[in-house]
C-alpha cells in the first residue's frame, strides 16, 4: 500500500530557510509541505541560505520526505493575465523566471501559480496574456514545473474552468512544464460538484488529463457550491464535508499526488486576528485516522493556549 502524501503550508524564513520549513512540516506529522519563498503578499525575496538548504535536504532524506513532492507557491499578488501596464506585466514575467531559479537552488520541482485576473479586458485577452507570459518564462524544455491552480472565479479570475486551463496549456510551447493544482475549496466555489468527485475527475481527464495533476490543495469551504467567493474552512467544518474530502485524499487515481492543507488558522480568543495558530498537526492526524474530530478547533486552542 502506497503511503499517503500529506502536508501543509509551512513558513520559510530568511534565518532558517529550508531547514526551518522541514522541521515545521515534521512537527505537524507531514511528509511533504508547501512554502512561499518570501511573503505571499509581496515580491521581496532574500538570498537563499545555501547551508540551511543543504541541512534541510539532508533532514528530508533522513525522514523520507521526497523533494519531488514539495511545492513552492508563487505570491498571489502577481498577475500574468493583464498586460495594460507593460512594466507590471514585464515585472511579473521577470519575477517568475527568478522564482524558477530559486526553486532550482532549493531543489524543488513544482511551483503553484494563480493564473491571473483579466481586470476588465476580457477572458480571451486575459488568457492570451497568460499564454504569452508563460511562453517567455518557460523558454527551456527543462526545469521546474508550473502548476496552474484551479480558481474560485472571484472577480475576474481566470483558470476557473477546466476549459480555460486547457486553453492556457495548449497555447504554451513547452507545456510539458505545465501542470494543474486542484484546490477543493476553489473547485466548489467555482461551481464544480466536489461531492461527486469521480464525475469531476472524469471531466478533468477528458478535458486536460489526470496526468497533469501535480498537487491538490485540501481545503473545506465556507461557501455553497458556485458562490465564487474563495473562503477556506478547516477540514470537515465546511460545506464540502469531511467524508467527501477523505474520498479525494485517498482516491485510487491520486495516490502519488501530494496533498497540501491551506486551511485557516484557529483563533484562541474571540476570533482575535492577533492570536491564531496552525491546525495542521490536528488535521493531518484526523486525516490519517480517517475519522472526523468535531472538537478539532478546541483541541488546537487547548494545545496553543499557553504558548
Image (cartoon, helix red, strand yellow):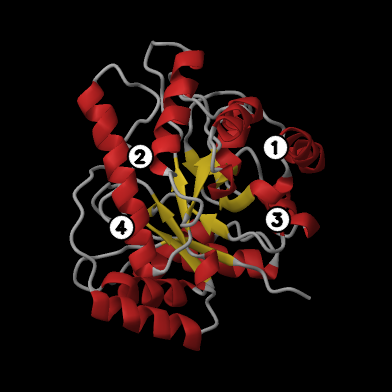
Q: Position of residue 92 (x, y in %)?
A: 29, 36
Tag 1 residue: 208
Q: Nearer the viewer, mark 4 or mark 1?
A: 1
Q: Position of residue 124 (x, y in %)?
A: 51, 14
Residue 246 shows which numbered tag? 3
Classify mark 2: helix, strand or loop: loop
Which of the two discs, 4 and 1, labels the residue nearer the N terminus? 4
Could you tell me if the residues under marks 3 and 1 are in contact, i.e. CB atoms within 8 Å?
A: no
- Badge 4: residue crowd in 10 Å (few <14, some 14–19, many ≥20): many
Q: Nearer the viewer, mark 4 or mark 3?
A: 4
Q: Position of residue 78 (x, y in %)?
A: 31, 35
**Residue farthest to the bottom, as pictured:** 62
Which residue lies at the image location 47% right of the left edge and 36% below the top edge?
A: 231
Tag 2 residue: 76
Classify mark 1: helix, strand or loop: loop
* C-alpha distance separating marks 3 and 1: 24 Å
* C-alpha distance separating marks 4 and 3: 29 Å
Classify mark 4: helix, strand or loop: loop
Which residue lies at the image location 44% right of the left edge and 44% below the top edge?
A: 138
Residue 226 shows which numbered tag? none
Amino acid at each position: 500500500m502506497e503511503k499517503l502524501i500529506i502536508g501543509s503550508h509551512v513558513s520559510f524564513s530568511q534565518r532558517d530557510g529550508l531547514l526551518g520549513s522541514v522541521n515545521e512540516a515534521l512537527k505537524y506529522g507531514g511528509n511533504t509541505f508547501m512554502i512561499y519563498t518570501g511573503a505571499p503578499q509581496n515580491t521581496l525575496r532574500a538570498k537563499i541560505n545555501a547551508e540551511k538548504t543543504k541541512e534541510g535536504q539532508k533532514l528530508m532524506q533522513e525522514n523520507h520526505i521526497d523533494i519531488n513532492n514539495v511545492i513552492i507557491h508563487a505570491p498571489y499578488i502577481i498577475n500574468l493575465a493583464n498586460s495594460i501596464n507593460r512594466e507590471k506585466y514585464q515585472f511579473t514575467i521577470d519575477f517568475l523566471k527568478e522564482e524558477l531559479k530559486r526553486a532550482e537552488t532549493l531543489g524543488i520541482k513544482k511551483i503553484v501559480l494563480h493564473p491571473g485576473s483579466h481586470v476588465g479586458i476580457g477572458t480571451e485577452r486575459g488568457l492570451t496574456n497568460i499564454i504569452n507570459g508563460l511562453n517567455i518564462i518557460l523558454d527551456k524544455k527543462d526545469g521546474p514545473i508550473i502548476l496552474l491552480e484551479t480558481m474560485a472565479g472571484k472577480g475576474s479570475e481566470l483558470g476557473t474552468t477546466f476549459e480555460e486551463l486547457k486553453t492556457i496549456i495548449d497555447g504554451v510551447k513547452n507545456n510539458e512544464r505545465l501542470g494543474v493544482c486542484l484546490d477543493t475549496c476553489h473547485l466548489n466555489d467555482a461551481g464544480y460538484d466536489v461531492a461527486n468527485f469521480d464525475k469531476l475527475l472524469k471531466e478533468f481527464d477528458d478535458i486536460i488529463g489526470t496526468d497533469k495533476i501535480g498537487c491538490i490543495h485540501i481545503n473545506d469551504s465556507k461557501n455553497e457550491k458556485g458562490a465564487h467567493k474563495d473562503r477556506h474552512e478547516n477540514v470537515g467544518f465546511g460545506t464540502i464535508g469531511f467524508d467527501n474530502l477523505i474520498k479525494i485524499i485517498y482516491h485510487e487515481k491520486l495516490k502519488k499526488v501530494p496533498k497540501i492543507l491551506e486551511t485557516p488558522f484557529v483563533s484562541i480568543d474571540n476570533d482575535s486576528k492577533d492570536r491564531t495558530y496552525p491546525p495542521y498537526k490536528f488535521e493531518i492526524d484526523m486525516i490519517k485516522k480517517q475519522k472526523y474530530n468535531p472538537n478539532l478547533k478546541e483541541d488546537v486552542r487547548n494545545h496553543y493556549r499557553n504558548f
